Image (tube, grey):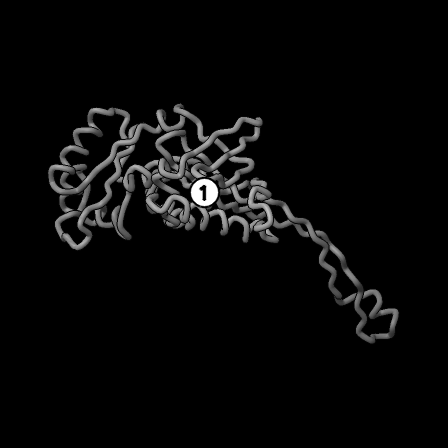
Amino acid sequence: MHVLAVHGWQEEDPDVAKTIADAIGILIFEARQKIAGGGPAVLASFADPQRAERLAARLASAGVPALVIDSVAVRGGKQPLRARRFVFEAAALRVELPAGAICHIGYDSIDLLLVVSTGSGPVQTTFKRTERKFSLGKTVLAGGVPMTRTVTREETVLSEDRDESIWLYSREHQTVHFDRNVLNYDGFGAAMQLTRSLNFSKLKHELQRCAPQAGYDERLLKRSVQARILGPGLNPEADLDLACEILALSLR
């Protein structure tokens, strides 16, 4: 599947929606819906890469920058590295991976930091609820005086556990993911904070301080933005990697 997305257009230009509608063969109203809220935004998906490239070229020539992303290539290419521990050294970030491998990422090679909200899967919570209910039997035995009984029942609630992740893009390595709830923060030494959330905030601050040239974007913390970028044909839970790829390409 080849995803066609647009980005970086002049939002005040009233002709953008018409340009998109004419290019991909939809109503202007539909085009406005797809680009509402700004870019990047997926317009359509195609099995034929040549058709997607032709449409992208047509849009670009009309002043609407477009991207074509091969979803199979995104998922079949180099897999991201997942950090387990890190240490801020003088000129590079030392990253330890779960299997014990180590890589060094020069601060001057970092060009983008995306902060992303991710789903860690469903969480099932079971609790006991106790309440008083009217008891007809006890009331009859008590000569008509209203009586109650204690009722205890178990209730199960399903919720989604959300995590936060930094996706670090550099010119030296494939993407590195720093997942808040997985990281070991002892690389901060005496500066380590008391909670994961505080340590993760410190990590974001330190990465921006050490790599001031890198772009920084937190839009994908909101699931609504993930859904808006991907459009109705794609799912943020299954296609988050595509949303990140689209945003990264539009920013880089």
Residue 61 image position (x, y, % from top left): 11, 37
Relative side of 108 to 126, left or right:
left
Q: Residue furthest front?
A: 90
Residue at 58% over, 52% down: 193
Residue 68 image position (x, y, % from top left): 26, 32
**Quarter of the figure that contains the C terminus:** top left
Q: Quadrant of residue 122?
A: top right
Residue 157 image position (x, y, % from top left): 62, 50
Q: Quadrant of residue 84?
A: top right
**Quarter of the figure that contains the N terminus:** top left
Circle 1 packing at 10 Å, graded few (<14), some (14-19), many (20+), is many
Q: Nearer the viewer, residue 214 or 123?
A: 214
Residue 16 image position (x, y, % from top left): 16, 47
Report which residue position mark 1 lands on.
Answer: 166
Is residue 233 placed above or below 154 in the rendered structure? Answer: above
Q: Amino acid at mark 1?
A: Ile
Q: Nearer the viewer, residue 214 or 14?
A: 214
Residue at 59% over, 41% down: 184
The answer to whether residue 186 shows anywhere in this view is yes
Relative side of 95 to 231, left or right:
right
Relative side of 38 to 113, left or right:
left
Q: Nearer the viewer, residue 170 or 249?
A: 170
Q: Quadrant of residue 2?
A: top left
The answer to whether residue 122 shows anywhere in this view is no
SS at badge 1: strand
Residue at 28% over, 52% down: 37
Is residue 85 placed above or below 199 in the rendered structure? Answer: above
